[in-house]
Amino acid sequence: MAYSIRTYGDPVLKSKAAPITDVDGKLVRLVDDMFVTLNESGLGIALAAPQIGVQKQIFVWNLDGEQQAIFNPEIVESDGEWVYDEGCLSIPGLYVEMVRPKTVLMRGIDIDGETVELEADELEARMYQHELDHLHGVLMFDRMQPDQRKEALIEFRRLEREADAASSRPESRLRRLRLK
């Protein structure tokens, strides 16, 4: 089952997620649903549980056709800097140049309940850091300098207005009705 992705302004995105204490069948079903939601979005490479309104420390990703999930992740090492245009499913349409560590070592629990360590660089490292931020109630806007944040919020509001205008046009409503 696909969930709706929560967007900027939803208070659940600013709350810290609770740690996972037991990997059980209910949690595995949630992970499966998160993959459905991510894949149906057609836009992102990763999704954190708070983005679908679930306050648990889980995120899933689909990078180069490999789907994985991790529980209670933490970055235990990082190094370097890498600048890249970062986007977010919860802030649709906005891409902002951001600096993050280039390499990371992340530790967490996999779907089998085993502790794992994953080394990553560049895009994969950025993805881990971005999704971990979601688990701590941190959004891209929170990582920006004040001037960059102001400009990004103005652009995001403009994108929201365009999306609202497009969805109120009769031809847009017809298209959505046909797709359902």
Image (spheres, grey):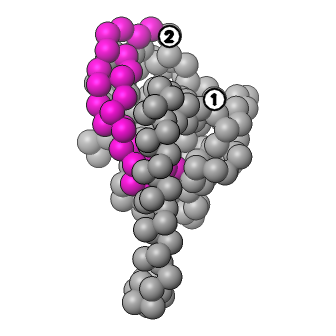
Query: At numbered mark 1, what does the secondary structure look like: helix, strand or loop?
Result: loop
Query: At numbered mark 2, what does the secondary structure look like: helix, strand or loop?
Result: strand
Residue at 50% in and 16% down = 75
Q: Earlier in the sequence, mark 1 or mark 2?
A: 2
- Which amino acid type is shown beneath numbered disc 2? Val
Q: Nearer the viewer, residue 162 or 44?
A: 162
Q: Pinpoint residue 24: horizontal percent, then vertical percent.
A: 68, 40
- 4 inside magenta stretch: no
Residue at 64% in and 43% down = 13
Does residue 67 appear in the picture of this structure?
Answer: no
Q: In this figure, which residue is indicated by the disc labeled 1?
A: 136
**Image quadrant where one finds the N terminus:** bottom right
Q: In this figure, which residue is indicated by the disc labeled 2?
A: 76
Asked if residue 3 is positioned above or below residue 141 in the image, the reply reads below
Decide: few, some or many residues near mark 2? Use Cα within 10 Å; few <14, some 14-19, many ≥20.
Answer: few
Asked if residue 67 is positioned above or below residue 38 in the image, the reply reads above
Does residue 72 appear in the picture of this structure?
Answer: yes
Residue at 52% in and 50% down = 90
Residue at 29% in and 25% down = 83
Q: Pinpoint residue 158: horizontal percent, then vertical percent.
A: 45, 59
Q: Nearer the viewer, residue 31 or 87?
A: 87
Asked if residue 155 is positioned above or below residue 135 in the image, the reply reads below
- Which amino acid type is shown beneath numbered disc 1? His
Q: What stretch is highlighted in magenta?
A: 77-101
